[in-house]
Image (spheres, rainbow, N blue to C red):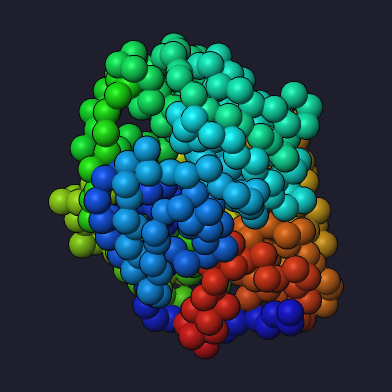
């Protein structure tokens, strides 16, 4: 796909629904009792993979644009799938579904695409084995294809060495299926808490105490009404674009600002961006707001420690912003980037270098020397990673010559209307 530069981005964007929350709404609705109604659902490839898996387990799900109805019949309503469950490109589907399947007395087999086949699953399959589940797969259950036979489970006290909401969620979901036992997960830093919030909306009791989350087994979920906020990880591409493309002013409506996800807003402030958060709504289970951004003089910053899990998916676009900021930006403590849809330390550094950025990979992040003009006239690739594709499309707004983006279709994973929205606000 050919990408052209922009003389400014102006207007309003209704950011599509949050990916993490959309997945969870379908999953929890599928094992709850009654009709769950979801609005502003993200119709991206990843969440559609989740829907297809639950349909194969006999759950009646109807999709009408961004409205979804899930007719759950409780955990007992799930049926043994006659076919393999295809998780596509989705790590969230793979890891959370394993947690749910842990409590089902039947056999399932998970398979995904080439990228999923490289992503480590031991972080979830090991604790699930400790809970009593029978799981196997390549490298003793570390990689797909993975087969699982659930059954009766015991509660565990698990200390995770990564701050991962997917790990935490899988264990908590399995924990729901023990016979009244307590399961708890402690993380090194707090990861996104969408599971905890949404389980409460579905009537479950979840206890949070600092970095530890606990759940008691044997609780049934009750259907809920879920309005999915706009995805801050998708909004991040337009927040960055609004800040670095000259002559820009963008308003992004009803974006989720959950504090475990909003690290990008902290970084924009640290870098000196003109960002405004207005119309804050806290009535729902997830807070949301309108975000306004305009072209700004940015300065470099350091991003590390407990901030990392709050912006892990935004690091590719933060790296691009840093190429346009005065001074040095250091990103560290972010080894987790290596096990995302691609090794995002390598893909970000490799592709931004092609465009003329001064950027170096480190063991746990990257270092960027800013205020370097981006050239163009080259071919770049998403490497099949949606967030790399969107980051490069925003980079191309700044290049003098056109940029050819390979594997642009990967963007459909989380933001199918991305190029339409970009074209609509581009001057
Ligand atoms: C997600 C958690 C994060 C994030 C991913 C979505 C979730 O992954 O990167 O895009 O929905 O729970 P980890 O749990 O691996 O940190």
155 above or below 62? above
Q: Residue at x 49, y 24 (%)?
A: 151
Q: Residue at x 32, y 41 (%)?
A: 74
Near-viewer residue (261 or 50):
50
Q: Is residue 177 left or right of residue 388?
A: left
In the rendering, at what x and y percent does residue 416 appear? 54, 71
Q: Residue at x 52, y 65 (%)?
A: 44
Q: Is residue 401 left or right of residue 238?
A: right
129 above or below 147? above
Q: Quadrant of the N terminus?
A: bottom right
Can residue 306 be seen in this snapshot? no
50 above or below 421? above
Can residue 2 be seen in this snapshot? yes
In the picture as drawn, the residue positioned furthest to the left comes out as: 283
In the picture as drawn, the residue positioned furthest to the bottom comes out as: 427
Q: Residue at x 27, y 34 (%)?
A: 220
């Amino acid at each position: 796909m050919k990408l052209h530069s922009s003389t400014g981005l102006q207007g309003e964007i209704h950011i599509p629904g949050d990916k993490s929350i959309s997945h969870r709404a379908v999953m929890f609705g599928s094992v709850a009792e009654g009709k769950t109604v979801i609005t502003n659902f993200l119709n991206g490839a990843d969440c559609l993979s989740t829907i297809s898996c639950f349909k194969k387990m006999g759950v009646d799900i109807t999709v009408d644009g961004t409205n979804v109805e899930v007719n759950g019949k409780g955990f007992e309503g799930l049926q043994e799938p006659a076919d393999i469950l295809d998780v596509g490109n989705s790590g969230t589907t793979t890891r959370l579904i394993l947690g749910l399947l842990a409590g089902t007395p039947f056999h399932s087999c998970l398979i995904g695409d080439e990228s999923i086949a490289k992503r480590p699953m031991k972080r979830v399959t090991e604790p699930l084995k400790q809970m009593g589940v029978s799981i196997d797969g390549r490298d003793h259950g570390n990689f797909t294809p993975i087969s699982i036979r659930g059954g009766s489970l015991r509660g565990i006290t698990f200390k995770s060495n990564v701050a991962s909401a997917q790990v935490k969620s899988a264990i908590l979901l399995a924990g729901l299926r023990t016979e009244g036992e307590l399961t708890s997960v402690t993380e090194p830093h707090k990861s996104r808490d969408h599971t905890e919030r949404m389980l409460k909306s579905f009537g479950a009791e979840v206890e949070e105490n600092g970095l530890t989350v606990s759940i008691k087994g044997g609780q049934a979920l009750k259907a809920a009404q879920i309005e999915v906020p706009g995805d801050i990880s998708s909004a991040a591409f337009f927040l960055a674009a609004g800040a670095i493309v000259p002559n820009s002013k963008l308003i992004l409506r009803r974006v989720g600002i959950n504090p475990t996800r909003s690290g990008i807003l902290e970084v924009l402030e640290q870098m000196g961006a003109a960002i405004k958060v207005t119309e804050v709504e806290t009535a729902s289970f997830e807070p949301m707001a309108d975000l306004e951004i305009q072209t700004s003089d940015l300065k470099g910053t350091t991003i590390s420690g407990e901030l990392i899990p709050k912006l892990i998916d935004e690091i590719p676009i933060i790296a691009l912003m840093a190429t346009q900021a005065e001074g040095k930006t250091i990103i560290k403590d972010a080894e987790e980037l290596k096990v995302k849809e691609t090794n995002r330390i390598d893909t970000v550094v490799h592709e931004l270098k092609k465009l003329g950025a001064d950027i170096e990979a480190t063991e746990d992040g990257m270092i960027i020397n800013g205020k370097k003009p981006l050239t163009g006239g080259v071919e770049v690739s998403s490497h099949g990673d949606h967030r790399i594709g969107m980051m490069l499309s925003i980079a191309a707004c700044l290049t003098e010559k056109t940029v050819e983006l390979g594997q642009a279709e990967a963007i459909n994973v989380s933001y199918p209307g991305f190029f339409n929205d970009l074209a609509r606000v581009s001057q």
